[in-house]
Each structure stands twice: as structure tokens, then as C-alpha cells.
Amino acid sequence: MALDRRQFMKQAAVSSALAAAGAVFPGISFGDWNKLTNNSGIVSWQKSPCRFCGTGCGILVGVSGGRAVAVKGDPNCSVNKGLCCMKGYHSVQSLYAKDRLTKAKVRKNGQMVEVPIQEALDLVASKLKQTIESHGKDSVAIYGSGQWTIPDGYVASKLFKGCLGTNNVEANARLCMASAVTGFMTTFGIDEPMGCYEDMDHANVFITWGNNMAEMHPVLFSRMIANRKRRSNVRIIDFATRFTRTSQAADMSILFKPQTDLAVANAICYEIIRNDWVNWNFVNEHVSFHKGKTNIGYGTEDHFAFQDKGENISFAEYKQFLEDYTPEKVEKISGVPAKDIKYLAALYGDPSQKVTSFWCMGMNQHTRGTWINNLVYNIHLLVGKISTPGNSPFSLTGQPSACGTVREVGTLTHKLPHGVVMNEHDREMAARIWDVPVTNIDPKPTYHTVEMFRALDRGDIRFIWIQVTNPMVTMPNLRRYRNGAQKDDRFVVVSDVYPTPTTDVADVILPAAMWIEQEGLFGNSERRTQHFAQIVDPPGDAMSDTWQIIEVARRLGFDKQFPWSEENYIEKIWEEYRLFHAGPKHEMAPYKVLRERSGVQWPFVNGKETRWRFNPKHDPACTNGKDFDFYGKKDNRAWIWARPYEPAAESPDDEYNFWLNTGRVIEHWHTGSMTRRIPVLHNAVPSAYVELNPEDAAELGVVNGEMVRIISRRGQIIIPAQINGRGVPPRGMVFVPFFDESYLVNEVTLDAFCPISKQPDYKKCAVRLEKV
Ligand SMILES: Nc1nc2c(c(=O)[nH]1)N[C@H]1C(S)=C(S)[C@@H](COP(=O)(O)OP(=O)(O)OC[C@H]3O[C@@H](n4cnc5c(=O)[nH]c(N)nc54)[C@H](O)[C@@H]3O)O[C@H]1N2
Ligand SMILES: Nc1nc2c(c(=O)[nH]1)N[C@H]1C(S)=C(S)[C@@H](COP(=O)(O)OP(=O)(O)OC[C@H]3O[C@@H](n4cnc5c(=O)[nH]c(N)nc54)[C@H](O)[C@@H]3O)O[C@H]1N2
Ligand code: SF4
Ligand SMILES: [Mo]
């Protein structure tokens, strides 16, 4: 069955006739929505964060006949004040498509057969045990998600790191937020934004650094646009590599060549210093200067380890370093006119302007992702525009709980809740709270995500449990990792809610309770923890991902560590987890408070939320008696880093002469497994396409809808062209969204990553095009 499905997909992808006829593709299935909603009236409206993006809008779910049938925006949620985007409004439909997974399946003689879920969980537990016995503890792994609830991630970490003793815990947020985290850690020594969405109501200059907010954070984007309407002096500048709906709505669109944001950021700092727009009071008191290693490679080889502590430099040395980045020199590298660079510098440098910078995957999916995060902080630090209302370098998250689950719970190989495995004190705290011997917790990190799948390919990992993520669509250089997952002697467990290319490679499929079919908590981009109660029942045998892990843990004998009852396990887990964050820097709200409110921002100290960190007027963790306290670093200063421009891992050349850029569209969520099962969203954008610049299209002789072959050194796809659609790439670049499993663009992308964050760069590789 699995093979048939894949073969069908392959055929579908190469057949232009099929594509043109809009034939039925795998991964698309609808419920009988009209029948479902044709009910006797809504009996209750219950609060929840939206299922989709990291904006974290509050919604109210209307329930009728035991089903979620409607959504309205929650007027009491400060994030969105009642507004939603099209994904939020239609989100509940994603629960009810016809092919929802409701029964567990296990592979028997090559066939997937339905079994009672308890039997499947027995098999998972015994395979886990056997694999550890014959290949050692680091031969088993769990790969989760920024869409995991906080309890999901917490129990995964407790079982694997605390009980089984392996640091093989990773999450897809490595593909998404890792560079943001290393950016925060290297500049501030502590993770997560200092500001909050309220910054938008105070700032009058907004600069998006390669963030298509209009489509990816639409409710925040609306708030920004509404602000521009209300106040006369608001300007929005979209600084990006491709012209998008965000560029269109902005007051100014500046396009730069991929990867050269590094050079432009340095040029802005050069200009700020040259014009003496530096805020010396701030810099002298609160900033120190550093440099790190250069020519750090691209992580394309196996077993990649990289460490860089950095060393102090003087301001004079920093200034000297910037000499290579005059606006005129950088114009040549970046294609951005020197006058535009000077304009940007003048906006940041003008003390009367409050500037908020936004970014997301353009800066994080970058082989110098950590560096570009550092460089944008440099700009804000030089002019002291940080940690005050409206002055905000704002790293947006993508997934609803990338912050809550992956960063705060710490579901990455080197992390523990509120700590890192390398730190003895952090291991001791974890062992105490988890009630395991401290020697269980391995002080050495193992594999980050790309390495984890390389280890599976090599056979160093033999067992992997994948929850709430679809890596057989979303890993870069996909064929390599799919071949690895399908090798003999690999055991793949997948918890999902629908069939996907990842369940296709599974040996066990566990049906999961989805979103409001369970109680849970998310954490959004602005340090806001959001609780949702179970609103409807899960179908069939579907069970929450948290409870699946608890069931397996108990089968392995860890009853003592997983003692909770089905009635109140979320509350118990939350109160245990909260112990990790005790103290003014991270204190989390108690369960009872979270149940009542539409989200609470941490640090939550003495009943008060913290909106701006490092600022003693708002942040109770500041103790140095000064006007700011960057307490994350030992020198109580934020660090400015001298980071050079270095080119992308792969750039266009004579043979592969185009940039391939990839990303998203507003209607679809990632691999489309949910949004392609919502009729209105599917019908709006029914299949993927390649965006071409009109002049490139003319040269290639293709018109809208004609098929184009995109070829890289790793693979190829054939896909219909779109010209003058919603986005326009510059000449020499093509763009493909990844929501459509019939066109697996990740068979073409490159698995190079930032050596510091280990986050892959999906935004850049070299391809050539052929008309089919
Ligand atoms: N509708 C919808 N919304 C979503 C999601 C979704 O799937 N659908 N996913 C969510 C998730 S998890 C994420 S991570 C976010 C992603 O949100 P975004 O990062 O906004 O979206 P992408 O489409 O991944 O990336 C688009 C941007 O990458 C920039 N870019 C490309 N190359 C470079 C470069 O070299 N440097 C810089 N600075 N920028 C570059 C482009 O200019 C473009 O603006 O969206 C979230 N929101
Ligand atoms: N080419 C390219 N690739 C990319 C990116 C890119 O920009 N370009 N971006 C990267 C980024 S930023 C991200 S965040 C990743 C996202 O990559 P993925 O996480 O792999 O993509 P999703 O489609 O969000 O996968 C979520 C899966 O969980 C399932 N699911 C939904 N709810 C539940 C639940 O409650 N329980 C369980 N068990 N399963 C559930 C869904 O059906 C779906 O299969 O993609 C990365 N890959
Ligand atoms: S902006 Fe994001 S969180 Fe808000 S409704 Fe849309 S998808 Fe949901
Ligand atoms: Mo993401």
C-alpha cells in the first residue's frame, strides 16, 4: 500500500496531463463539512490558542453535537484581539477529514495491518528495549516538533534523557528556530525575545529582514498595517530576496542577493558609526565587543562538531573590521544601492524613530544563521534601541509551540528543561525533579536533527519515534534520509493524525489525538504560555502524544517517573515542569492561572507578566541598579559580534545557474497534511508550482501552467510554472512552496547548515531549469 502510494505520487508528479486535469492527488481528503456543521446549534464556546502559527492567536471554538464546528477570534486575547486569519478560522475542519487515522497499524510481512493500540504500544516498548540491549542506548531516538504540546515534549525528554539515558532527543524546530536560539545565546546568553507584540503599537519604523509576514504571520501583519493607518508617521520596509505580498504592502521594498544580508547589516553598522549615531551612553554601559572564528564551513560532512566561545575585542578593532563594509563596497556584493543602505542606517540611527525589526526563516535558515541574528542585534545595540516599548529586534517563531516546547522544555540534544546537559548543576536539578540517578543523564550531546537522520542512514540509530512532524517531506536533501529510514534493521514509529509520506515509511503508526482533542499547552513567540482544555473527544483509538509516551514508559518499568492518572496528568506534568523554571528570570504561571486566561507571559513573578526583559521598569530579574541589565551574560552586557560576510554553501554557477528558494503560502500549513484536508484552503491553492521571474520564463519559453524541470546536484522535480502570481523572484531565482507532497522540492534542496546552530539552509541552493 505504502509503495503504491509513493509510486502513484511519482507518476502524478511526472504527468503534466494529470496535473493539468487537477486529478486527485494523495494527501487530499475532505470530511463532509456541511453535514457536520448542519447541527442543532452551538452549545459552548471554549478558548484555545490557534493550532497553526507561532503568532499564537486566541480563538474560541464553537461546539455542537460533540464536535468542533466553528471558530471565532478571542476578543480577550491580547495577541489578536478577536482577529484570525483564514487558517485559524477554518482550523477545526482539519480534525474531520475522511482518512483520519483512528487505529494503530503495524507492519506484518511487509503489510500495514490494524491492531489494537495497546498491542502497538507493546511492540514499541519491546522494540525500544531490544534495540538498546543489542545496540546501546544511543541507538534509539525520538524526533518531535514545535507543534508538540509542552507536556508532549516534557515527557519525551524525561523518558529519553532522564530514564533511558540518551540525548537522542530532537525536534523539527532545529529546522526552524535553532539559529534564533544560538543568536540569542551568543548575543545575550539567554534565549527568547526581550520584547512583545505590544512593540508594534509603539514602533514607527518596521523592517522585515526576509520575513513574509503578510502570509506567515498574517494577524501580526494586520496589526502593523492597522498601526500605519492610525498614525501618520509609520513606515514599513521589506528587506528580502523575493518580492512577496509583504513587499507589496510595505512602503518600500529592498531586494538583496541571497546570503548578502550579512554584508548589508555590517554596512548599516558602518554607517551608524561613521555618522556618529552610536548611543554611547548605552554602548559604554551595556555592550561588549567580540569576534569569533571565520571560514567555519557548511556542515555537509558527517559528525560535524563546531565550538566557538569568541574573544573580546575593542571598539576600535570592531570599527576596523567594518572598513570592509562601506555601503559602496556592499552595493557590489548585495545588489542593494548604497543610498538604500544609508537610508536604512539613518532610520536605525535617528534617535526620534522607534524601530522594530522582524525576522523568521530568511535569517534562520541560513548557513550563517547565527551570525545574521548577531548582526541585526548589533544594529539595535549600537543605537540602544532595545528592550523599550517599540524598540525591538524581534525574532518571530513559526510553530505554535517552538518556544514553549522546544526552547523552554529543551527538546534538543544538548538541552534540558531550563538548562543544558553539559552543565553539572543543570543535570543535578533534572535528576532531582525527574527522580532518576544523575548518572543517567549523559553530559555529552549526541545528534542534532540532520545528524540524527544521517545516523539513522548509517545504522548508528536503529529505532526512531517520530511525533507531530513529517520529515519525509521536510528534511533537506530528502532522498538521502528517506533511503536511510527505509533500510532493513531500522524501526520507525510514527505518531500522526493522517497518512503522510512519513507514515509510509513507518513500521508502527500510532493514531494521535489532535490539538483540542486533548488538554495541552503551547508557548508562542512572545513568551506567552497558552493553555487549552480538551474540547472534543479524539476519534477511535487516537490518544495524545503525551499519553502514548507515558504508556511506553510504564511498559519499560518507569512507573515511578510517570505516575500520573488520565484524569489530571496535564496539570501534574505542568506543576512538575514548572519547578525547573523557578526564579525571576523564567518563572512560569501556575496551572490555575493558565486555565483561566488567554495566555500568560513569562517571567510571571508575583502575579505579574513581564513584557520587556532586561529593562528594570518591567523585568523583576534586573538587579544591577542601572537602566538596563543584560543578566544573561557574565559581564552583564549584550555582545556585539564582528561577523564577516561569507558566501552560501552552494551558489549558482555555469552548470546550475539559478538560485532555488523555498517556503510557504498563507493558505497552507507546512506539508499540507492538515490544510489540504480543509476544502476552502485546498481549493484556493490546490497544488504547488514554481515561481519564475517573467523575463526568465520568457527566455525559457514557458508560460503559466507549463511544466518545468528543476535539477540540482541531488535530485529533480517537474512542476508547473507560475508567472506573476503572488510572489515574484528576481531574475536568476526560482521559488517553490513545500506544502504539496506530490512535488517534493526537498529532493532538490541541500543539507548544508549553520555550523553553530546546525539549522539547514532551505532558502539557497543552485539548480538549473529545463522546459518539459
Ligand atoms: N501560512 C503559513 N504560515 C506559517 C507557516 C506555514 O506553513 N504556513 N509556517 C510557520 C513556520 S513554522 C515558519 S518557520 C514561518 C516562516 O515564515 P517566513 O520566514 O516569513 O516564511 P518563508 O516562506 O519560510 O521565508 C520567506 C522569506 O525568506 C526570505 N529569504 C530568502 N533568502 C534569504 C536570505 O538569504 N536572507 C534573508 N534575510 N532572507 C531570505 C525571503 O526574502 C522571504 O521573505 O511561518 C509560520 N507561519
Ligand atoms: N524546503 C523547505 N523545507 C522546510 C522548510 C522550508 O522553508 N523549505 N521549513 C522548515 C521548517 S521552518 C519547519 S517548521 C518544518 C516543518 O516540518 P514538519 O513538522 O515536518 O511539517 P508539518 O506539516 O507541520 O508536520 C506536522 C505533522 O504532524 C501531524 N499532526 C498534526 N497534529 C498532530 C498531533 O496532534 N499529533 C501528532 N502525532 N501528529 C500531528 C500532521 O499531520 C503532520 O504530518 O519544515 C522545514 N522544512
Ligand atoms: S495568524 Fe497564525 S495563529 Fe493567528 S489565526 Fe492565523 S495561523 Fe492561527
Ligand atoms: Mo518553522
Image: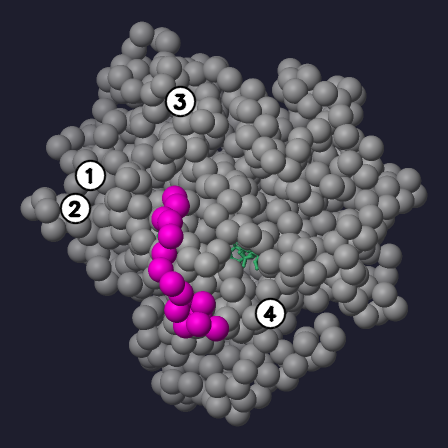
Amino acid type for the residue under numbered disc 3: Phe
Alpha-carbon neighbours of circle 1 within 10 Å: few (<14), some, or many (≥20)?
some
Amino acid type for the residue under numbered disc 4: Asp
User: Is disc 1 in contact with disc 2, using a CB cutoff of under 8 Å?
Assistant: yes
Q: CA distance from mark 4 to mark 2?
A: 43 Å
What span is in magenta? 32-47
Position of residue 414 measured from the top left corner of the image (x, y, whole percent): 64, 33
Which residue sits at x=70%, y=67%?
Answer: 504
Alpha-carbon neighbours of circle 4 within 10 Å: few (<14), some, or many (≥20)?
some
Q: Secondary structure at mark 2?
A: helix
| Cβ of mark 3 under 8 A from ligand 3 | no
**N-terminal of the two: label 4 or label 2?**
4
Q: Residue 270 in magenta?
A: no
Which residue sits at x=39%, y=32%?
Answer: 596
Q: Name the side, left or right, on which 317 lies relative to 402.
A: left
Q: Which residue is mark 3?
A: 604
User: Is disc 4 in contact with disc 2, using a CB cutoff of under 8 Å?
Assistant: no
Q: Which residue is mark 4?
A: 99
Position above or below: 64 against 143: below
Closer to us: mark 4 or mark 2?
4
Position of residue 741 measured from the top left corner of the image (x, y, whole percent): 57, 70
Amino acid type for the residue under numbered disc 2: Asn
Q: Which residue is mark 2?
A: 227
Amino acid type for the residue under numbered disc 1: Asp
Residue 201: give its label: 1
Position of residue 133 measured from the top left corner of the image (x, y, whole percent): 91, 40
